[in-house]
Image (spheres, rainbow, N blue to C red):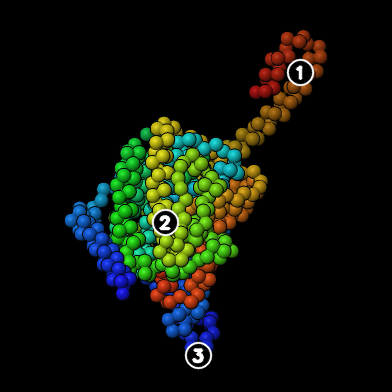
C-alpha cells in the first residue's frame, strides 16, 4: 500500500492531515502539516482530488467551441472570466473582430462575475475565521448577481455564455436597468461589509500580521491578482496588458499598504478584494453607459473554427489572478495542445512558504486569504 | 494602561457597529424562500431540462454532433417512398423515421450547445427543475414516439427498399453503361459524318453529348 503520510518526524513533532474533507479547506484540499505543538513547521499541499483532465479534453474535442463549457468548470466560482480568456485566445488566433456590443456585455458580465467571486471569497474567508453573518450577507448579494446572470444566460453557475466573437444569446431587455439598479444597491453594502467584518477588531486580530507574503517571494512564485496586489505591487492585467476593451475605462488598482499590520498579510489581501469590488462597480457603470443598444451578438460567430497553424498565449485577469491559455493549433478542428495557467495553482504552491512558523489556527486564515478554488488548481 | 483601555474601546465599538448592521438586517425583508411551500419562478430562458418536440425533428443529427459529452443518441431510418412523413411546422420536409432519440439527462451539462444548431428549433431547454429520480436509468429520456413493432416494421421496409434500390441502381448502371456504349458508337459514326457536315450541326451535337 502507498504511504499516506510521507513526512518523517522527530520526537517533538506531529503530523496531521487537514482535509481533503475539512470544512474550512476550500474544496478538496489536503494539507499535510508537521507541527511542533501548535506551530507549523512544514506544510505541504496535496492536490489532485478534483483532477478532470481539462487539458486532455480540450485536445480531444472535435471542435474548439466544445471546450468552452469545460473552461467554466475550472474555476466554477468565476466561470465567465474563465471563458473570457479562452475566447479571447481563439479570437486572436483567428484574427476576428468582435462587435462593440458584445465587448461591452462581456466586460459587464466579467466584472459582475468578479464581484460575485470576491463576495464568495470574502464571505468564506470570514466564515473560516468564525464570522458567520457576513457570509450570509455576502451570499444575499451574490444571489442578486446570479439572478441577473440567470435571466441573461439561462444558467446560474456554469454559463457557457461567451462564444468566439459573440455571445450565445442576447441579454434580456431589462438587463441594463437591472444591472444599474444592482450597482446602486450594492455600493452601500460594501460599507456595511466594512463595518461588519473588515474593521472588526476580532477579525483584524485574526488576520493582520498573519501569513505575510513579502513582495519578493510573491514575485518569485509568480503570484498575480489580489494576492500580488496585497503585497503592494500595482499589477493588474486589465491595466498593464489591456485585453478586450478595458483600456477605455477609468478605474484604479487597489493595493495593500500594511495599514493594520505588515504589508502583504492576510488582511491586506482581504481588503484588496473589497476595494476591487468598488472598482468593478465603476467599470460596470461606465460600460453600461457606453453599451450600444443595438447589434446582433451572434452575427459574427464563425461557423467553423479552424485557426492557422501556430501558437498563442493570452492572459486575462480573473478574480484570482492571471489566467493564461496557451494553445497550439495544428490547423485541425481541435487544438494540438491546450495549457491553462491557473492562478490558484500558483498561489497554492506558495502556501508552504508563507505558513511556516504560524499557528495551526492561522493556517485556515492563510488558506482563506489566498482564495483558491480547487477546481482550478486541479483542472 | 491607557492603550489597553483604548484598545478595549475600539473592540467594543467595532462589535457594536457590527451588531447594528445585523439588527438592521433583522428588521429588513427576508430573502429566503421556504422551498417546497414556496418556489422561485425560473426566468423564461432558464436552462434546466432538455425537451425535444419530436414532431418537428428531421433527424439531421446536428444536435448530437454538437454535444461535448455525447449524451444525445439518435437512430434514424430513411422513410420509404410510399410514405410521406409530412413537413415540420417550419416547413422542412421530414425524410427519416426517428427510431431512437434518447437524451441522457444525467450526463447532460446544460451547456445549450445542442440547441443552437437545430434547423427546426425543436430541441430546447424548458424551465423545469424538479425531476430527480431514484434510478439513474430513468434519467434517460426517450423522445421517439414510435412503438417497438413500428420500429421493426419501418426498419424492415427500409431494408427492403434499400435492397430494391441497390438492385435498381445496379440495373440502372448496367443500362447506363449500355447506353453509353451505344452513344459512343453513334458519336463515332457522327464524327465521321461531321467531317462532311456543315458547322450548324455542331452545337446540337454537343448538347446531345451532355445529356
Ligand atoms: S445541453 Fe449540452 S450536454 Fe446537454 S445534451 Fe445539449 S449539448 Fe449535450
Ligand atoms: S438538430 Fe433538431 S432536427 Fe436535427 S436531429 Fe437534433 S433535434 Fe432533430
Dot 2: element: helix
Q: Which residue is mark 3?
A: A11
Q: Position of residue A223 (x, y in %)?
A: 53, 60
Q: Where is residue A293? Give x, y as percent.
A: 40, 32
As rendered, which of A139 and A87 lies closer to the eye? Answer: A139
The numbered mark 3 sits on a residue in which chain? A
Q: Secondary structure at mark 3?
A: loop
- Would you say residue A86 is visible in this rendering? no
Chain of the residue on which disc 1 is drawn: B
Q: Residues within 10 Å of mark 2 (few under 14, many from 20)?
A: many
Callout 3 crowding tier (Cα within 10 Å): few <14, some 14–19, many ≥20: few
Q: CA distance from mark 2 to mark 1?
A: 90 Å
User: Is residue A296 positioned above or below B100 on the image?
Assistant: above
Which residue is at 48% across, 77% downward?
Answer: A357
Q: Quadrant of the C terminus of chain B?
A: top right
Frontmost residue, B116 versus A69:
A69
Of discs 3 and 2, which sits in the foreground? 2
Q: Residue furthest front?
A: B2
Q: Quadrant of residue B32?
A: bottom left
Asked if residue A156 shows in the view, the reply is yes
- Viewed as shown, does residue B150 lie left or right of A57? left
Residue carrying label 1: B190
Select label 1 or label 3 by which is in front: 3
Q: Nearer the viewer, residue A271 or A118?
A: A271
Up the image or down, A355 lies above or below B200; here it is: below
* Placement of A262 over or under A337, stated as above or below: below
Taking the spot 51% from the left edge, 53% from the top edge, the residue there is: A234
Task: Establish whether labels 3 and 2 are both on one chain.
Answer: yes
Q: Please give the label number shown on residue A273.
A: 2
Amino acid at each position: 500500500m502507498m504511504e499516506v503520510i510521507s513526512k518523517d518526524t522527530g520526537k517533538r513533532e506531529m503530523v496531521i492531515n487537514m482535509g481533503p474533507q475539512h470544512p474550512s479547506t476550500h474544496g478538496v484540499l489536503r494539507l499535510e502539516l508537521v507541527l511542533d505543538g501548535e506551530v507549523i513547521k512544514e506544510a505541504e499541499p496535496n492536490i489532485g482530488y478534483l483532477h478532470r483532465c481539462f487539458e486532455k479534453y480540450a485536445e480531444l474535442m472535435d471542435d474548439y467551441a466544445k471546450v468552452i463549457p469545460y473552461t467554466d468548470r475550472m474555476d466554477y466560482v468565476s466561470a465567465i472570466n474563465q471563458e473570457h480568456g479562452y475566447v479571447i485566445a481563439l479570437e486572436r488566433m483567428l484574427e476576428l473582430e468582435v462587435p462593440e456590443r458584445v465587448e461591452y456585455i462581456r466586460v459587464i458580465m466579467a466584472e459582475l462575475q468578479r464581484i460575485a467571486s470576491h463576495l464568495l471569497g470574502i464571505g468564506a474567508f470570514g466564515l473560516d475565521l468564525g464570522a458567520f453573518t457576513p457570509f450570509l450577507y455576502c451570499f444575499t448579494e451574490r444571489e442578486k448577481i446570479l439572478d441577473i446572470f440567470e435571466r441573461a444566460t439561462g444558467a446560474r453557475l456554469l454559463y457557457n455564455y461567451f462564444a468566439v466573437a459573440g455571445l450565445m444569446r442576447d441579454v434580456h431587455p431589462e438587463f441594463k436597468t437591472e444591472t444599474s439598479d444592482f450597482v446602486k444597491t450594492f455600493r452601500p453594502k460594501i460599507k456595511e461589509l466594512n463595518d461588519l467584518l473588515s474593521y472588526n477588531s476580532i477579525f483584524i486580530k485574526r488576520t493582520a500580521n498573519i501569513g505575510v507574503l513579502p513582495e519578493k517571494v510573491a514575485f518569485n512564485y509568480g503570484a498575480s491578482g489580489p494576492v500580488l496586489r496585497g503585497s503592494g505591487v500595482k499589477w493588474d492585467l486589465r491595466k498593464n496588458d489591456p485585453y478586450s476593451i478595458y483600456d477605455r475605462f477609468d478605474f484604479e488598482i487597489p493595493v495593500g499598504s500594511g495599514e493594520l499590520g505588515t504589508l502583504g498579510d492576510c488582511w491586506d489581501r482581504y481588503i484588496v478584494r473589497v476595494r476591487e469590488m468598488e472598482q468593478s462597480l465603476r467599470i460596470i457603470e461606465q460600460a453600461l453607459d457606453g453599451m450600444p443598444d443595438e447589434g446582433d451578438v451572434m452575427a459574427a460567430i464563425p461557423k467553423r473554427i479552424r485557426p492557422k497553424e501556430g501558437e498563442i498565449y493570452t492572459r486575462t485577469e480573473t478574480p484570482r489572478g492571471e489566467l493564461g491559455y496557451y494553445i497550439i493549433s495544428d490547423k485541425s478542428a481541435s487544438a494540438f495542445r491546450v495549457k491553462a495557467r491557473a492562478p490558484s495553482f500558483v498561489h497554492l504552491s506558495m502556501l508552504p512558504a508563507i505558513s511556516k512558523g504560524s499557528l495551526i489556527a492561522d493556517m485556515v486564515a492563510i488558506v482563506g486569504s489566498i482564495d483558491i478554488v480547487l477546481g482550478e488548481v486541479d483542472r | 494602561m491607557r492603550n489597553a483601555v483604548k484598545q478595549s474601546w475600539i473592540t467594543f465599538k467595532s462589535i457594536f457597529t457590527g451588531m447594528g448592521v445585523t439588527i438592521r438586517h433583522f428588521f429588513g425583508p427576508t430573502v429566503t424562500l421556504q422551498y417546497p411551500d414556496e418556489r422561485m419562478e425560473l426566468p423564461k430562458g432558464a436552462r434546466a431540462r432538455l425537451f425535444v418536440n419530436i414532431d418537428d425533428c428531421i433527424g439531421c443529427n446536428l444536435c448530437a454532433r454538437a454535444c461535448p459529452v455525447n449524451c444525445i443518441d439518435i437512430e434514424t431510418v430513411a422513410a420509404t417512398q410510399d410514405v410521406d412523413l409530412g413537413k415540420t411546422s417550419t416547413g422542412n420536409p421530414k425524410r427519416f423515421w426517428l427510431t431512437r432519440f434518447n437524451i441522457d439527462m444525467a450526463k447532460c451539462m446544460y451547456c445549450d450547445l445542442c440547441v443552437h444548431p437545430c434547423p427546426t428549433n425543436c430541441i430546447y431547454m424548458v424551465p423545469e427543475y424538479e425531476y430527480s429520480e431514484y434510478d439513474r436509468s430513468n434519467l434517460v429520456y426517450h423522445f421517439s414516439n414510435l412503438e417497438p413493432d413500428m420500429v421493426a416494421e419501418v426498419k424492415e421496409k427500409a431494408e427492403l427498399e434499400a435492397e430494391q434500390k441497390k438492385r435498381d441502381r445496379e440495373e440502372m448502371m448496367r443500362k447506363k453503361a449500355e447506353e453509353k456504349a451505344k452513344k459512343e458508337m453513334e458519336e463515332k459514326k457522327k464524327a465521321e459524318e461531321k467531317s462532311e457536315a456543315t458547322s450548324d450541326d455542331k452545337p446540337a451535337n454537343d448538347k446531345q453529348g451532355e445529356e
